[in-house]
Image (cartoon, rainbow, N blue to C red):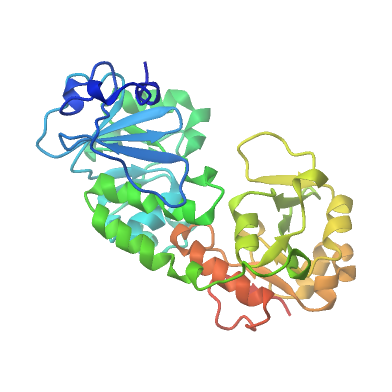
Amino acid sequence: MNVRSLLALPLTIFLVGCGQIPQNSAVSSAGHMELEYAQRFSVDYCEDGCSVIHIGDEDYLLVPEGQEIPQNSGDMTVIRQPVENVYLAASSAMDVFRSLDSLSAVTMTSTKASDWTIPEVADALGSGKMSYIGKYSAPDYEALLTGNCSLAIESTMILHSPETREQIEKLDIPVLVEHSSYESHPLGRMEWVKLYGLILGQYDRAEQVFNDYTAAFHEVNVEEIPDDKRKTAVFFYLSPNGYVNIRKPGDYVSRMIELAGGKYAFTAEMLDIDENALSTMNVQLETFYQTAKDADVLIYNTTIEGELKSLSDLVAKSDIFADMKAVKEGNVWCSTQDMFQQTMGEADMIRELNRIFTGETDGSDLKFLYPLR
């Protein structure tokens, strides 16, 4: 019997704390973490000070420093505080640690220094405070051991390499597989800061960080903009094989466009969308042209193919762009290289998109987007 099925039973079975609950249900009546946007994790608090973290189909038991592991913790993954010497293979979580001033807790990563756009992380790797120990599917296991790793944080990519996870766990290192990339609401991705704050023993600070970082979102008021008055936009890049890679309708980037007062030009009804975890998909150039030629705003994703400098750079990739409305009107923008690594900047990104849609910026005051001229 798992934790969720036990929640349906009478509260009389929930005695004093985690250790007194049978099986692996370390849930008591002590309450749960209040979340506004995140839907891919939840936390139940136990009366003995432990916490049960639910992510997908997995449950994790967070045990405070100095406290014994409850005898009936079952098959939950146990994470013991203090959490130090973290191996962070889920790159999107690094900015969350930075926002909590807790990069010192991360000493190992699966991303090379040259691939980081967060200056503090690149500096930490350069100074030796943090080490690159190999890609997520082939980490240096000896480095994990000698580095006294207390927690490995993986993205769902590790699900494609189960033998790697198994090997890490054989070293008695708990592996947390995070699902923040599955959040459809951008602020849901940001709200994972509360989970990491809890794990690091900084929950109060995490709540304040979340409120501070999402303030920009609450400055945007687009509720009264009718559908036919919203600027249509497309977020894309042209792949080397000739396809156009677009964000899927409903993913967090298309949601940012909508929350900013825009309208994502592609809809689910237009596309044959694969039911997979990917947030992007490839479409034929002709298919892209049919929908994007009349879009008000084009946003080019520079993360994969590198930054563009001018409209002529875009047209050089394919002459179909020259005939598009946004190109003719000079309303083409590019994302900066650090957009996807700065998870905690998504509220600011929504505000920047809103300023583009309302014509309130020439781009000189934006951080995550710049115009092509």
Q: In this orientation, which residue lies closer to the viewer: 71 or 304?
A: 71
The answer to whether 65 appears left or right of 26 in the picture is left
Look at the image and tell me in which quarter the C terminus lies.
bottom right
User: Which residue is located at x 38 percent, y 55 percent?
Assistant: 96
User: Quadrant where the N terminus lies?
Assistant: top left
| Percent x, y of residue 55 | 41, 35
Up-down: is 362 above or below 160? below
**Which residue is painted at 26% across and 52% down in the image?**
203
Q: Residue 266, position in %: x, y?
A: 77, 53
Q: Name the one closer to the observer, 350 or 334.
A: 350
Residue 96 vs 364, above or below: the answer is above
Image coords of residue 146 (percent x, y): 22, 37
| Residue placed furthest toward the left | 66
270 displayed left or right of 75: right
Viewer can see residue 38: yes
Residue 126 in view (yes/no)? no
Nearer to the camera, 223 or 64 = 223
